Image (tube, grey):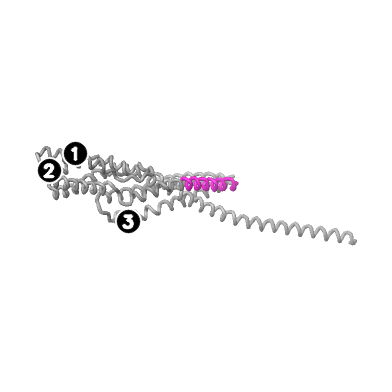
Amino acid sequence: MSEAEKEYENDLNSDVETEHEHGHEHSHRHKHKSKLRPFFFSVLSFFLAFALFLLSVCAVLYTTVFSKDYILNIMRSNGYYDMVRSELQSQMENLVDASGFDKEFADSFVKSCDIQGAVEKYVSSFYSGDKTLVDTISFKQDLYAAIDVYINDNNLKVADESRANISYFVNEAAEIYVTQITIPFFSTIANYIYKARTILNITTVSLAVFAAIIIAVIFFANKYKHRRYKYLFISCCGGLLTVLILPTVLFIMDIVRKINLNTRSIYNLFVNYFNNMFSSFYIWAGVLMAASIVTLVLYIKHYKHAINR
């Protein structure tokens, strides 16, 4: 074999070895990439599940804590106004006993009070950002008018000293009225709620955009449809399980009913308010469950189509 032929054979072997090395390197990179893809999309699924959970929390807050109608509906549907009236009547009866009025006077006056209107005005003022306290002016005027009718009907003579006692009685009654209409800590909480509404709006929009971006990445970065729905199914299931944890634990431990509050009306309002709020989580859990079922069905459908090709 000549020197030229030997040189040609060596170059050919060198090219074959180089091509083999490149092929081996490409295969190694492909295997490395194939291992990173599932991890990458699993991480995306985790973030999407967390975003879905937070969006569910925001939705619950919108429809409960941040809604004036929510607390008013709780009051209307659970006899709150009747309980407040009953407690006010009991307190007024104790006051009239010490003031020389008949018990029937307290009963008839309390029945004439617009308890529902006063409570709803009190609640609405805070949700609109006002710091309005319970209006006692109308209450005092009505009570003075009722006392005058009572005095005339019973042909009573009122001395100056008695007039002073009547003023004291009216002021004491007004304090009782304010105590019954107000909700402990509500004024502070409601004003924080009013100020936090903008933050909640920004948070909700940001989470929605974040979730949409992740869904778009999962869709467009996966060539095969069954893989898209696989990761979406994982995300929906993760969000579902996370949403279920908080209300389920609280209901099992029955923490809400163990809270000790002063009056029956406030206790019942508190229990119904939070039980209904926690129950709202199950509504959004149902939405995520429906999404999980849909994505699972689509995953199975496209997976079967992929393996049968």
Alpha carbon distance from label 2 to label 1:
15 Å
Residue at 66 percent of width and 58 percent of height: 28
Task: Give the amino acid at mark 3.
Answer: Ile
Alpha carbon distance from label 3 to label 2:
54 Å
Q: Indicate whether residue 163 is drawn in magenta.
A: no
Q: Residues within 10 Å of mark 1 (few under 14, many from 20)?
A: few
**Residue 202 visible within the image:** yes
Question: Which is the main secondary structure of the residues drawn in magenta?
Answer: helix
Q: Is residue 294 left or right of residue 87?
A: right
Kindly identify which residue carries mark 1: 145
Q: Is residue 149 left or right of residue 297?
A: left
First-in-chain label (3 vs 2) = 2
Q: Position of residue 74 (x, y in %)?
A: 31, 44
Task: Give the amino acid at mark 1.
Answer: Ala
Task: Give the magenta range.
Answer: 201-223
* Image quadrant occupied by the C terminus: top right
First-in-chain label (1 vs 3) = 1
Residue at 31 percent of width and 41 percent of height: 121
Kindly identify which residue carries mark 2: 158
> Relative to the observer, which residue lies in front, 231 or 306?
231
Q: Indicate whether residue 218 is drawn in magenta.
A: yes
Task: Give the amino acid at mark 2.
Answer: Val
Q: Which mark is residue 255?
A: 3
> Relative to the observer, which residue lies in front, 204 or 145?
145
Q: Secondary structure at mark 3?
A: loop
